Amino acid sequence: MGVVADELGLVHFDGSGFAGLIDSWLDRFPEPSILAARNALPPVGREFELYPYPVFDLPLSGEKVITFCDIRSRICTMTLHPGDVFLLPPGVWKLPRWTIPHEMSSLVFQEKFVRITYVELEHSAPEGGRPVCSCFFHTADSPTGEMRALLRVLCTPGLNEKAGGAVFRGLLHLVRELIAREPPLRLPKSEATFIKIRNYLIDNCMSAIGREDVARRFELNCAYLSRLFHRFEGCTLSEFMTRLRLDRAAMLLRDTVLSVDEIADRCCYRSTPFFTNQFKRYYGLPPARYRSSLRAEEYAQQFSSTGGDRPDRSAVPFSERAPGR
């Protein structure tokens, strides 16, 4: 554990320690600035990250380097320092660089809980590598209505950095209150281990990792790893990874203009026909038809919202309009 973690006495799954982390951050940074990534075509050949929920990165010490698309649709690389807040809205990509030692925390607002993490990077990671997050806390309750309202404000394109920082402080106070209402939780060792593995897979599902890689990473026997998934998830690790990757594929079909071949490759499928069959079994439609059905639904919604005879074509991106129309 790093300097900040030692000062705060952070312990895995200990709410009081992570509440202290939030208190410390609020005291140290009364006027933070928030930097938000925006949607654009992801970089080719890089293992970018994207999630279906908002994620906030908070550097705690050192420097955090990250590549993303800014509000002007420029791909840029920025160095974040303690006090900076980086927001990754749902369905938007980022490419973190694990090259400079640092400590950081992330807030992840999933549908059923808020996840707060702590990561220490002691040494530069190899190209494409990333440290394992082994210290985090999950709230038992879902994000509140007030939190969701502030998240909508923060994910609004064009929000001023200083104003966004003030809104984020309000969001942190609400998370702090949510943690304070929860009783101390003591998980059995097997369940705590499984949760660490599960979160690792969620964070790394677009990398080519399998059961042996995960077992080696967490210094576990493969058979024991399989038993953990049958016990806590009711499926095999392979089935769990397939669900994660197909969910990410659906997000890429919805939020990017990547081809089906590119999406298959990014989701670790080396055969596009096999990917297409897997996707159809899971979603009921092959990828191309799934994408076109989403576009048709958006078009219909736009048509109904105008109240006239034809939809407002200005809302359709130029690259997606039919030629000659």
Image (tube, grey):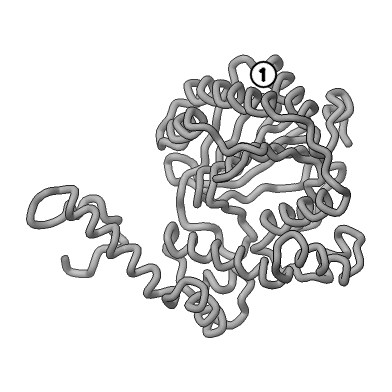
Residue 2 place in picture, x, y as percent? 87, 33
Q: Residue furthest left?
A: 309
Residue at which label 1 appears = 26
Residue 133 place in picture, x, y as percent? 78, 46
The residue drawn where x is 67% and y is 18% is: 26
Q: Quadrant of the N terminus?
A: top right
The residue drawn where x is 64% and y is 60% is: 47
Q: Residues within 10 Å of mark 1 (few under 14, many from 20)?
A: some
* Label 1 secondary element: helix
The residue drawn where x is 42% and y is 76% is: 285
**Which residue type does callout 1 highlight?**
Leu
Q: Is 102 left or right of 57, judged from the image as shown?
A: right
Residue 27 place in picture, x, y as percent? 70, 14
Q: Quadrant of residue 206?
A: bottom right
Residue 101 can be seen in this image: no
> Which of 127/220 is in front?
220
Q: Residue furthest bottom?
A: 273
Residue 82 can be seen in this image: yes
Looking at the image, residue 85 lies above or below residue 198: above
